[in-house]
Image: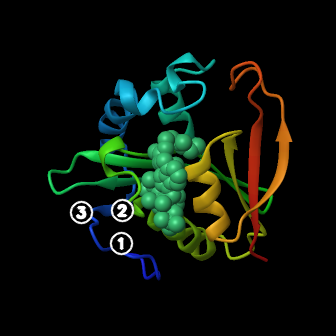
Amino acid sequence: MSSDSNVSTINQPPISISIAEEKDLENLIIYLSQKEVDNAFVKPLSERPISIRDRVFRDFKEGFWLIGKDEEENVIASLAIIYHDYTAECSTFSISPLLRGRHIGTKILIEAEMILQSMFPEIHMIVIDSWEGNTPVKKLVEKLDYKEINRYVDTRKRPQGVKTITYGKDIK
Ligand SMILES: CC(C)(COP(=O)(O)OP(=O)(O)OC[C@H]1O[C@@H](n2cnc3c(N)ncnc32)[C@H](O)[C@@H]1OP(=O)(O)O)[C@@H](O)C(=O)NCCC(=O)NCCS
């Protein structure tokens, strides 16, 4: 699968982006369980009410995962997507720490939009969750025309004093 976007691919290592198959899930769990990947989430995924393993299998069952792989087939990026009621909810968005800031995240979200529009032509909205202070996500999604649609306290997912921010893009 390849994306046809205007995103600069200069300095981007060769990455393949695909919908995860069942055989990819163990590698996805290994990827998300790496300390530096886990700890980049606020709260870390391992401190949420659902374990990383259960999260990976739940979202595979209820939706799908887009994953990035390097040339050695290691998982280096993730995005979970669940579609319901004309809305796609994106979560667990992650790029391997050493590869951040090279527009791979932008490329994956653009790829997600194209896949969603082809799988669900009736889709109205794509939403993505983040948290206060997450500048990379804010910059990334605002460049792709997402707008903040909600900001709320969510003590299950966030530490005290940090609100969840939901960004949405109307694609009717
Ligand atoms: C959020 C994340 C997936 C973005 O992936 P990425 O590949 O690094 O993003 P991109 O390179 O496409 O960057 C998008 C924009 O944000 C900017 N950006 C990236 N990292 C940044 C940083 N640390 N501070 C400020 N801006 C940053 C980029 O410069 C780019 O803007 P530009 O086009 O003007 O250069 C990645 O940073 C990550 O894994 N973060 C940890 C987990 C997380 O926060 N997940 C999101 C919540 S679900």
Residue 79 visible here: no
In the rendering, which numbered label is found on residue 141?
Answer: none
In the rendering, which numbered label is found on residue 17?
Answer: 2
Name the residue that disc number 1 marks.
1
Q: Residue at x 29, y 37 (%)?
A: 27
In the rendering, which numbered label is found on residue 13?
Answer: 3
What percent of the width, then of the height, locates residue 105?
Answer: 46, 58
Circles 1, 2 touching at the beta carbon (< 8 Å): yes
SS at mark 3? loop
Q: Residue 59 appears in which quarter of the rendering?
A: top right
SS at mark 2? strand
Q: Residue at x 14, y 51 (%)?
A: 72
- In depth, the one of 165 and 58 nearer the eye is 165
Q: Residue at x 32, y 51 (%)?
A: 99
Residues at marks 3 and 1, CA–CA distance in whole angstroms: 16 Å
Of callouts 1 and 2, which one flags the residue occurring earlier in the amino acid sequence?
A: 1
